[in-house]
């Protein structure tokens, strides 16, 4: 019978165990083993049936069971203990309060009570019970919030609540990816609806074309100390189309995607305002957009200022100062781009009515060399709206500067104002509970929360090897059960599946490869020479085994074909006991897979992997990385913490490149990894003197030494605590300061900077470097010689205070430039020249004395740049006049 009405009945807990409800709704339980154990011990079977979901677990108890629990003194004591621990965690001073703004008043000593930082992301991967992510970007956002919470950094997350999240993956009999979209009921999720004082849902509204309105309610998740606001368009006030705007993550076409992003950005700012009003808290001081999707947040904030009477330039100046933009991908297909006409159509419906439309469109225009007309590029808009921007690893910073240098014409790529902060992972989430429990037993403290990673050197080899084996066994058990259930879905009968009980071997070197399946990650590179891989898998003495997983975006046929090719290989009866593909890669699978792998394989097409984080999670658990030198590995590989697969970037074709890199991968496995894992050193095989490593106690000591070195060095370096601290110090604090300065005294400095910018932009076209002299250079100059540089510059309407004139000097290299050759400067330094003489008519002589600091081909040039103390970089305005 069809139900005509539906209610969600929330479990009402007896007084003595009422704390369970807060423990279940604050997601801190997900990275706090003691709280997790408490839930498990309430009813181990129900815990496992609920898929380790505290809200579902509590909902599964009937009144009788609840009364029993409430009368159990030991449970009651544990609930009280856990709730007071949570209270302490939520209120005590942590890193941000103690060490950062603490006694010294913090760097600069002028931090008032800090206002929060808003962190926008289209996806958040926090726990399996809130499946609102597709891959690395979302997991990173989740880890960012968790570490911010642990560190006491006042962040507020802003995202969307998708009714079906991302899809669930299964396989058809012939190995084709199948997608399903189970619908989530927000009432059964650890979420609270944001409500007005009268109890009605607080609503965010955006105008849509044809007089329609998009309404969204706002859910709040508590990630430890960090509130996460999630906008949800599935409300009765919407028509059906508007209701389904937040139905799926990365589903739908451009039109739906644009509406999701308008809701995330503009609606997100409105949600922050609602939240501040309803909780009596301060509005954020800094706005950080994780990738370009939330870029419209800047437009909404400009609208707030312009509707209060500020002009465009002043409003933009103020908003830019407090905005941080992080770019996450050098893959062009990964960058959000819309038809400009579509953006125009939506804004004409009445979004940001005080902001002139041409300004909105100009922010996303690809009006630079190599750009496409008619496109609204969200990354470009992010860079134009954020005074501070970064990539997510050192190499990615470099690649991003090159990729976006068209926005700063006249500047070399290394001057493009995009820095980098390398991603990290949240250790308490990703270090297996088995490892942290052992650390507590051995050292009385979980090494991971104490940052005391060096302690791993105190663990005896035998003990560490046994721990690794325990983790491998747990993985194997999980693999077998997942494989069975996958084969059942693929239509196999129980009788056919006996073989799955003995899949994988607890003594065999286990390699993992799991991630999303875009082409550049090259899921199938290992299949380049299938016979060679087969030999490795089936070696009678020293085999390897592989666990593979990954989802392909539903619209990506190429990715699905790669999965099919992989699954067909794993279906082969000759190898199926040594290589498996597990469907539906997610946080839950990752939490057993990553600790269980001895080796983590990563073979993207360099340099397309911006950072990559899964290898970090593996390293924290004592696995070793075997990876192309891309993303984080490019800066953290040190020769002793794993292996580098060489890149054949100069190969003639991608085919050839794949051949060469796959061959290098196989040979590393055959010659380096396998012998070392099984306790023989490669040099032993070559007949070197000395006893074989394994001959004494059967332990692979060299492998274990690599594990210890990896955990001790990569543990702290790859931690999200390090990442969040970097963001606070390098970006949030300066952005907060700049924003505060701009806005003080009724936006006095923003007005000043804005009118200065307008004047300088208008006048800069007439700046000319007329003539440059150098005096005092000998016929054959020597290192240490000084020369007097004199530049005659026409500044037109500008004055010397508006500009910085500098001599840029360095090593000269000659590069082909078309048919000619051109001298260019490398390893440059800059010397500021000072005004020496007013020559009248806006003409000035600038001088300085330049010390020749190197031998060989030396050269210099002179350039003029706008200069103002409130600019964050010399390239910020993308204006420069170079001599010659
Ligand atoms: C860590 C993680 C990712 C990101 O992995 P990359 O190495 O960055 O590709 C994706 N999915 C899940 C489930 C993860 O845990």
Image: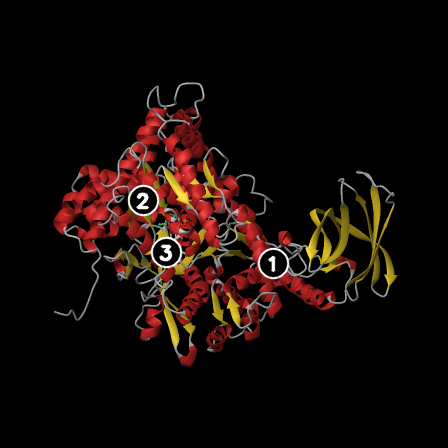
Which of the 4 image quadrants contains residue 417? bottom right
Q: How many marks?
A: 3
Q: Which mark is residue 134?
A: 3
Which residue position holds label 2?
A: 547
Query: Does residue 93 appear in this view?
Result: no
**Which of label 1 and label 2 is nearer to you?**
2
Q: Nearer the viewer, residue 15 or 514?
A: 514
For label 2, the crowd category at 10 Å Cα-Cα, with few meaning under 14, some 14 to 19 and many 20 or more, is many
Give the position of the N terminus as an image quadrant: bottom left
Query: Does residue 666 appear in this view?
Result: yes
Residue 129 horizontal/vertical position (percent): 29, 52
Give the position of the C terminus as an image quadrant: bottom right
Q: Which mark is residue 132?
A: none
Q: Residue furthest bottom?
A: 210
For label 3, the crowd category at 10 Å Cα-Cα, with few meaning under 14, some 14 to 19 and many 20 or more, is many
Give the SS element for disc 1.
helix
Give the SS element for disc 3.
loop
Q: Earlier in the sequence, mark 1 or mark 3?
A: 3
Q: Nearer the viewer, residue 749 or 494?
A: 494
Which residue position holds label 1?
A: 405
């Amino acid at each position: 019978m069809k139900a005509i009405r539906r209610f969600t009945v929330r479990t009402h807990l007896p007084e003595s165990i009422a704390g369970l409800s807060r423990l279940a709704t604050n997601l801190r339980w997900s990275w706090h083993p003691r709280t997790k154990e408490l839930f498990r011990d309430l009813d181990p079977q129900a815990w496992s049936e609920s898929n380790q979901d505290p809200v579902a677990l509590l909902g599964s108890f009937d009144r009788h069971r609840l009364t029993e629990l409430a009368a159990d003194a030991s449970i009651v004591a544990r609930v009280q203990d856990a709730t007071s621990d949570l209270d302490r965690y939520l209120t005590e001073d942590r890193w941000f309060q103690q060490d950062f703004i603490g006694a010294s008043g913090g760097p600069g000593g002028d931090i008032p009570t800090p206002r929060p930082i808003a962190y926008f992301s289209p996806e958040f991967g926090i726990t399996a019970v809130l499946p609102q992510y597709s891959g690395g970007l979302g997991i990173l956002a989740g880890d960012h919030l968790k570490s911010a919470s642990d560190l006491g950094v006042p962040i507020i997350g802003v995202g969307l609540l998708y009714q079906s999240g991302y899809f669930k993956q299964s396989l058809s009999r012939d190995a084709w990816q199948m997608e399903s979209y189970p619908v989530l009921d927000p009432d059964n999720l650890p979420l609270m609806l944001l409500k007005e004082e009268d109890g009605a849902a607080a609503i965010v509204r955006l105008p849509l074309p044809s007089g329609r309105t998009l309404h969204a309610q706002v859910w709040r998740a508590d990630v430890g100390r960090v509130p996460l606001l999630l906008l949800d368009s599935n409300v009765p006030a919407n028509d059906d189309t508007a209701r389904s705007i937040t139905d799926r993550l990365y589903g739908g076409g451009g039109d739906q995607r644009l509406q999701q992003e308008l809701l995330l950005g503009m609606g997100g700012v409105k949600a922050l305002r609602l939240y501040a009003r309803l909780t009596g808290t301060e509005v954020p001081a800094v706005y950080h957009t994780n990738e370009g999707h939330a870029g419209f947040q800047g437009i909404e904030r400009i609208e707030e200022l312009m509707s209060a009477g500020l002009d465009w330039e002043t409003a933009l100046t103020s908003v830019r100062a407090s905005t941080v933009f992080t770019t996450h991908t050098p893959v062009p297909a990964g960058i959000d781009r819309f038809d400009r006409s579509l953006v125009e159509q939506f804004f004409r419906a009445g979004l940001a009515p005080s902001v002139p439309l041409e300004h909105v469109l100009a922010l996303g225009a690809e009006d630079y060399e190599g750009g496409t007309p008619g496109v609204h590029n969200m990354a470009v808009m992010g860079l134009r709206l954020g005074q501070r921007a970064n990539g997510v690893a050192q190499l990615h910073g470099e690649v991003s500067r090159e990729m976006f240098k068209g926005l700063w014409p006249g500047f070399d790529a290394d001057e493009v104002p995009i820095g980098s902060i390398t991603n990290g992972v949240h250790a308490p989430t990703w270090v297996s509970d088995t490892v942290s429990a052992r650390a507590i037993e051995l050292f009385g403290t979980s090494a991971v929360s104490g940052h005391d990673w060096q302690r791993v050197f105190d663990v005896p080899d035998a003990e560490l090897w046994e721990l690794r084996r325990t983790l491998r066994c747990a993985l194997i058990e999980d693999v077998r059960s997942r494989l069975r259930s996958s084969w059942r879905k693929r239509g196999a009968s129980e009788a056919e599946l006996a073989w799955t009980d003995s899949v994988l071997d607890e003594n065999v070197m286990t390699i993992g490869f799991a991630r999303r399946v875009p082409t550049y990650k090259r899921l199938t590179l290992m299949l380049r020479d299938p016979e060679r891989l087969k030999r490795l898998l089936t070696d009678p003495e020293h085999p390897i085994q592989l666990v593979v997983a990954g989802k392909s975006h539903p619209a990506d046929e190429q990715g699905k074909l790669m999965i099919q090719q992989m699954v067909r290989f794993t279906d082969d009866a000759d190898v199926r006991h040594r290589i498996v593909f597990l469907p539906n890669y997610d946080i839950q699978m990752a939490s057993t897979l990553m600790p269980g792998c001895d080796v983590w394989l990563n073979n993207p097409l360099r340099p397309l992997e911006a950072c990559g984080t899964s290898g970090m999670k593996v390293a924290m658990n004592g696995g070793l990385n075997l990876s192309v030198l891309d993303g984080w590995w490019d800066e953290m590989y040190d020769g002793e913490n794993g292996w580098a697969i060489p890149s054949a970037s100069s190969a003639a074709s991608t085919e050839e490149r794949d051949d060469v890199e796959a061959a290098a991968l196989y040979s590393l496995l055959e010659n380096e990894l396998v012998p070392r894992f099984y306790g023989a050193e490669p040099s032993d095989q070559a007949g070197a003197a000395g006893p074989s490593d394994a001959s004494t106690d059967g332990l692979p000591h060299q492998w274990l030494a690599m594990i210890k070195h990896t955990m001790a060095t990569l543990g702290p370096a790859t931690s999200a605590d390090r990442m969040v601290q970097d963001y606070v110090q390098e970006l949030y604090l300066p952005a907060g300061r700049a924003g505060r300065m701009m806005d003080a005294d009724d936006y006095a400095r923003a007005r000043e900077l804005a009118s200065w910018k307008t004047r300088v932009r208008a006048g800069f076209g007439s700046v000319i470097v007329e003539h440059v002299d150098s005096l005092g250079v000998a016929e054959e100059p020597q290192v240490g010689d000084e020369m007097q540089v004199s530049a005659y510059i026409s500044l037109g309407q500008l004055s010397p205070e508006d500009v910085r004139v500098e001599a840029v000097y360095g090593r000269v290299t000659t590069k082909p430039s078309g048919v000619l050759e051109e001298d260019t400067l490398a390893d440059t330094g800059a010397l500021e020249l000072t005004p020496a003489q007013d020559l009248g008519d806006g003409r000035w002589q600038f001088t300085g004395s330049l010390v020749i600091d190197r031998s060989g081909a030396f050269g210099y040039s002179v350039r003029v740049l706008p200069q103002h103390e409130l600019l964050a970089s010399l390239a910020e305005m993308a204006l420069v006049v170079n001599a010659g």
